[in-house]
Image: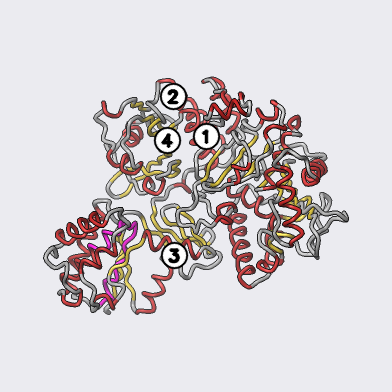
Amino acid sequence: MSLKMNNLLDVEKYLLLEMAYFHLPPASRNSISPQTPMKLDVYIDLIDQCSYSAYPAFISRSKRGQKYIKARQAVFRRIYATSENLDDVVITGYVNDNYGLYGNTADHRKTSFVGFAFADSDGNATVSFSGCEFMYPSSMVLDWAGCMVASIGKITRHHQKALDFYDAQMQGITGERNILGHSKGGNLATYVFINRLDEDVNAYCVNAQPYCWYTMTEAQKEALKTDRFEYIVHADDPTRRASYVSYISRTAPINRYATRSIINIHGFAEVNFDEFGNLEGTRVIRETTNRLKSQLFRDFAGEKRLGYDECVQRFQEKIEASTSAPRLFSTTLDEVLMVTQAQEAILWLKDSDREGAYIYPVIVKSPSADRFYQLKLRNGSGLASQCVFEGLPLFVKDASRTEVPFAQVGRAAGDALSSGIVVPLGIDETEVFGALELINKQDGFFTVADFALVNEMTLTMLEVFRKTGKSLDSFQDFSLLRIRKGKQKLFSLEKHTCYEKVLSSLNQRNAFLAMITGNKLASDEVLFFNRRKFESAKKDEMKELIRREYAFMFLDPNRRTGKQRVRDILKASLPSAKKISDRNIRVKLAAGRIGLGDKLKTRVKDLSDAEYVLLEYAAARLQQPLLIVVDAGFAGLNPAAVAVVCRQLKQDCRNKTATVIVLRRNEA
């Protein structure tokens, strides 16, 4: 339990950042001080009484706004309940320099500054600054005017408020001192950070308004490119372009199922965290790649690189204090990616089933993470499996000159594997529990120096992991779909299995379908699909998930008697293709494979049951879903015809090309 930056997971930092936008109700706004702190869970319980300042007051108070606030409250409660770091955290300071009922300062001239202070039992402290306030017109004027002035290097009253708040809250702090900031709050956090460098402070900023480069000293510019300062940006967020920024530490991809509105991209809810709480998106070397800009802005510090010994020493310092295994593993992947300039990094774990031992990815740093999470590799199916089952580190400089098969890994990466490094994880060669793999170096091949560096960094990480005393039990999971209520598992489906569910009635069938599609997800329940987390508040994302990744067979009774033609059913099932000719070719091939090549213009109602079930099968496979749900017991079709398709789907599962749920009716 710690507020130390190396221990806090990204999802926990995002919680502490987003909290600053929930203004405490009037009855509680003056109740917090170092002498009378408020427990973090007590504040979370008050959120449904707060005003949410990221939207105008009339929206926040509307029925829809209240629903959103309660949904975020449920998310905060889940994060807090499962956190190893936040249990003893208390709020020791709260300043709300706004007009109206929620402000708690006596100043006649307001700045719209909002800040929280947190402390833990180990003497560590953190302050968090909110971004632009939208609650009242006065808030918008004050904040946006302050942003415009700050962009040209002017120190505003906002900055002075932030610095004064930090100084007051850090009085007597003996442990680590940290600053969090989002949007305009990130600009304030940067200002406080560069003006308190002598205090060994750390900062973590998300979509921050950049601080004016010209006004900083060389020492301050250097500090922004160290590990003490993290600058996170969301893909497609325009804020970074407000000024010169050469110190971005991570670009986080937007959730592929998100709505992608600008306010959501800039906010907190549309990025991906893995199921352990690590933010997706890999760290980058903070250097100026545009040499013209480097000269114009005199950014010479950006061209520096660390040597071998410096990399290892810095890495050891970064992870030594870590007590969270997920954070330790994620940080290790980030660091090896950064220093080797690899394109993808994967942490594999070893497990076994009835067919024997295999490895599967537990943490993936790659744009193709969704495809990698589908892999389940046996001995002889790639570099990583060979490393794990032989217990030896492997280095392939040029994959075209090796006989090791890389087909599955290459398909997951979406590119040919050209170069690779993989090192075993374990006590020794006889007790290997996994591997760390790097795939493809940017602009070239991995070198022997890269191989040696990754080996040493991995050994360092393993030593720290042993000291944590943690086990790998919580990582052992190869499920495609899981539904949990707290720590209770409500449902789990392993990848590439054919699961049969026997139901007694249509009501039972409908309830089961509602459960596996998240339609009846309670506020305290979480659905994990392919290691993506979905909550009841994210209805739109859930709908997009179902549209993209699920395929349903025989679920629509009207389709069997409909007037649609075979080719129309198949075309509608195809993922988008660039050319109409490509779609037509794929439809003809699919129809030919199921024996309906000469019936493309035939109406569905004129097909026999045997032909119709094959059409449903072809349509489902054309969708390229991750999960196929077959309504075998309630469709009223010829049982023998349905049985043929079910046998084929079981074979697809054995071939590792499908995951299937078959709904059967209890005839007893």
Residue depicted at 14% across the width and 68% down the height: 599
Single out the mark in the foreground, 2 or 3: 3
Q: Which residue is mark 2?
A: 450
Q: Which residues are magenta?
A: 618-635
- What distance separates the C-alpha of mark 3 from that of mark 1? 33 Å
Taking the magenta stretch, the answer to whether it contains residue 624 is: yes
The disc, 2 or 3, on the residue closer to the chain's N-terminal end is: 2
Q: In terms of image quadrants, where is residue 103?
A: bottom right
Single out the mark in the foreground, 1 or 2: 1
- What distance separates the C-alpha of mark 4 from that of mark 3? 31 Å
The disc label shown at residue 284, or none: 1
The disc, 1 or 4, on the residue closer to the chain's N-terminal end is: 1
Q: Position of residue 205 (x, y in %)?
A: 64, 43
- What distance separates the C-alpha of mark 1 from that of mark 2? 16 Å
- What distance separates the C-alpha of mark 2 from that of mark 3? 43 Å
Image marks 3 and 1: residues in contact by CB distance under 8 Å: no
Q: Please tell me whether mark 1 sits on a helix, a strand or a loop.
A: loop
- What distance separates the C-alpha of mark 2 from that of mark 4? 13 Å
Counting other residues with Cα less than 10 Å from the Cα at mark 4, is it few (<14), some (14-19), or many (20 or more)? some
The disc, 1 or 2, on the residue closer to the chain's N-terminal end is: 1
Q: Which residue is mark 3?
A: 543
Residue depicted at 87% across the width and 54% down the height: 107
The disc, 4 or 3, on the residue closer to the chain's N-terminal end is: 4
